[in-house]
Image (cartoon, rainbow, N blue to C red):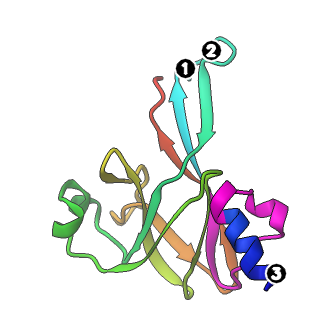
Amino acid sequence: MLAVLVAAVVATVGVSAWFLGRPWIRQGVYGHVILLEGGCMPPTTPYACRESAVSRLITIRAPTPWTATYRSPQEQGTTIIASSSSGVDGYYEIALPPGRYSVFVEDRGQEYCNRLTGDGIACPLEVPAGRLNVDLQIDHATR
């Protein structure tokens, strides 16, 4: 009963996960979604470069070739493994078995990705046995 009450409070007010002793998953990935904005080119004036936690949809796909990211998510042809939304504090958790994946964050109506591997995989994610902390950054900053 207490767990249901705590979950209702989290859903309502967005209490930070660390405050509640999370992560709760035993296997998978967790972290925060952060939006970077403003003038971040050194030297910057104080407060010109801003980071804020944001609520966004996170999509875990089978390893996705970088070239597929130029198409809409429906045309990419890679399987969606899991998805979840971050809370108002940016925190998310997704249960996943160990393996290789691509992770995307919704931004401006599209799946956002800003990294690739030498073998051309977009936004790679290697999940080991256990939990993996991965903070996802959406970069709108000017440099």
Q: Is residue 27 above or below residue 67?
A: below
Query: Judging from the image, what secondary structure is the residue with disc 2 in?
Result: loop
Q: Which residue is mark 1?
A: 41
Instruction: Judge whether residue 29 is colored magenta.
Output: yes
Q: Is 1 in front, or is 47?
A: 1
Q: Is residue 42 above or below residue 107?
A: above
Query: Judging from the image, what secondary structure is the residue with disc 1 in?
Result: loop
User: Is there any visible trace of residue 94 in the rendered image?
Assistant: yes
| Badge 3 amino acid | Leu
User: Is there any visible trace of residue 23 in the rendered image?
Assistant: no
| CA distance separating discs 2 and 3 | 47 Å
Residue 54 position in % (x across, y down): 55, 47
Instruction: Judge whether residue 62 is colored magenta.
Output: no
Residue 133 position in % (x across, y down): 68, 66
Q: Which residue is mark 2?
A: 44
Q: Is 39 in front, or is 108?
A: 108
* Quadrant of res 67: bottom left
Residue under the point 61% across and 28% down:
50
Q: Is residue 110 above or below residue 61?
A: above
The label shown at residue 2 is 3
Q: Earlier in the sequence, mark 3 or mark 1?
A: 3
Check whether the beta carbons of the residues at disc 2 and disc 1 lie within 8 A of each other.
yes
| Badge 2 amino acid | Thr
Q: Residues within 10 Å of mark 3 (few under 14, many from 20)?
A: few
| CA distance separating discs 2 and 1 | 6 Å
Residue 60 position in % (x across, y down): 43, 72
- How many marks do you count on the picture? 3
Q: Residues within 10 Å of mark 1 (few under 14, many from 20)?
A: few
* Left or right relative to 2: residue 66: left
| CA distance separating discs 3 and 1 | 47 Å
Find the magenta span and give its range. 11-32
Query: Judging from the image, what secondary structure is the residue with disc 3 in?
Result: helix
